Image (cartoon, rainbow, N blue to C red):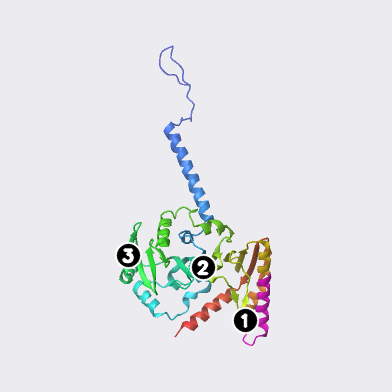
Amino acid sequence: MPEVGNSANSVVVPVKRGFFPLSVRTKSLLIAAIAVSLLVILLLVFQRQAPPEAARLLPESDGIVYLNVTPLRAATHFDAHPVKHDPDYQQFIDATGIQFERDLAQAAFAMHRMANPLGPNGPVAFSSIFVGHFDRLRLASYLERIAQSRETYDGHEIYDIAIDGRTDRVAILSSDIVAVSNTPTAEQIHSILDRHRTAFLPLSSNTLLAQHYKDVPLFSLAWGLGKLAAGLGDDFNVFGFRLPLSVDATFIASLRWAGALRLKVEEIAPNGAAATVSANSLEALLGIFKTAENVLPNAVTSTETKDLLNSVEIEHHDDRAVLTATIPLRFLQTLSSVSGSDSTP
């Protein structure tokens, strides 16, 4: 053991090998690093469970629809079918280089029910988020040419475009995100820009998502939630058959891949009795479809349609009526092929 000093009265100081006391500053830095690491881990966990950013950017609304277009495009190859474009859409493509069937990756739509269904927006106005590949400068140049006016809000340009008696407001949020809203006021597009500032926070979202996104099945490729009246009005008819679905009920619909494309539509009714009535009505409607397919002269008798109808299951639990079905991939591919051939000159 080494000694300190040469004097006979020198104090012997033991030295523990391999031990280096930490300073207060080092301890503080270590604690801070651990805290930051834990925070990052928590954010990543919440991020995986949170709604997609495109949906989180949407303002308060009565209904929401989200589409993850990339896997649907890969499965159906709908972008490979030639389509005759509307002249206005073709002009947009020529000016911006953007072709939605090719360049769109995600889309989210908020539905705002209008007090006056006879107004320029009709019964519903929309706020939309589009995520994809586009030339930002080329798009901005196009918007500048067609806009009647512009507004700067939170460092972003909002382009006001008059269409059919209403105003569509467009803002480029980033190199791959565009926001559009056709509501009567600018409140909704402003809300989107406000949310964009805190988009990195996974729990930042509107009330509808906060309340019901937990009911959307994990890994859904497309989903929608909200009240039926937000998009369809107060009276819902299918081929003259009125479904007694409550305008107060909340609906959650989803498509996800689980070895096959699984459809799930869930109604959260005001009470158990209403859920029972809805389930019974859907059973009756399903029976009508199956009968019509077999007896009507113009019935669609494809194997895919039969498989789809035969896969439908309807049940109810307490205040919830649930419909599930398996959609054959061939069914979607057939639909996209027919759509493409019908649009081809």
Residue 103 placement, left or right of 278: left
Give the image quarter of residue 127: bottom left
Residue 273 counted in the magenta span:
no
Query: Above or below — where is 308 with respect to 267?
Result: below
Task: Give residue 328's position: percent from left, percent from top.
Answer: 60, 73
Q: Secondary structure at mark 2?
A: helix
Mark 2 or mark 3, earlier in chain: 2
Measured as percent of width and height from the top left, residue 148 is found at 32, 70
Residue to which mark 1 is pinned: 302
At which x and y percent is residue 229?
A: 55, 68
Amino acid at the residue labelled 1: Ser
- Residue at left 66%, top 82%? 292
Q: Tell me which label, 1 or 3, sits earlier in the chain.
A: 3
> Tag 1 or tag 2, which sits nearer the N-term?
2
Does residue 259 appear anywhere in the picture? no
Q: Nearer the viewer, residue 328 or 2?
A: 328
Q: Nearer the viewer, mark 2 or mark 3?
A: 3
Quadrant of image for the C terminus: bottom left
Residue for badge 2: 71
Q: What amino acid is labelled 2 in the image?
A: Pro
Tag 3: amino acid: Arg
Q: Nearer the viewer, residue 256 or 30?
A: 256
Disc 1 from disc 3: Cα separation: 52 Å
Q: In this picture, which residue range is highlighted in magenta?
A: 280-299
Q: Secondary structure at mark 3?
A: strand
Residue at label 3? 150
Front label number (1 vs 3): 3
Q: Determine the residue positioned at 65% across, 61% down.
A: 271
**Which circle, 2 or 1, is nearer the viewer?**
1
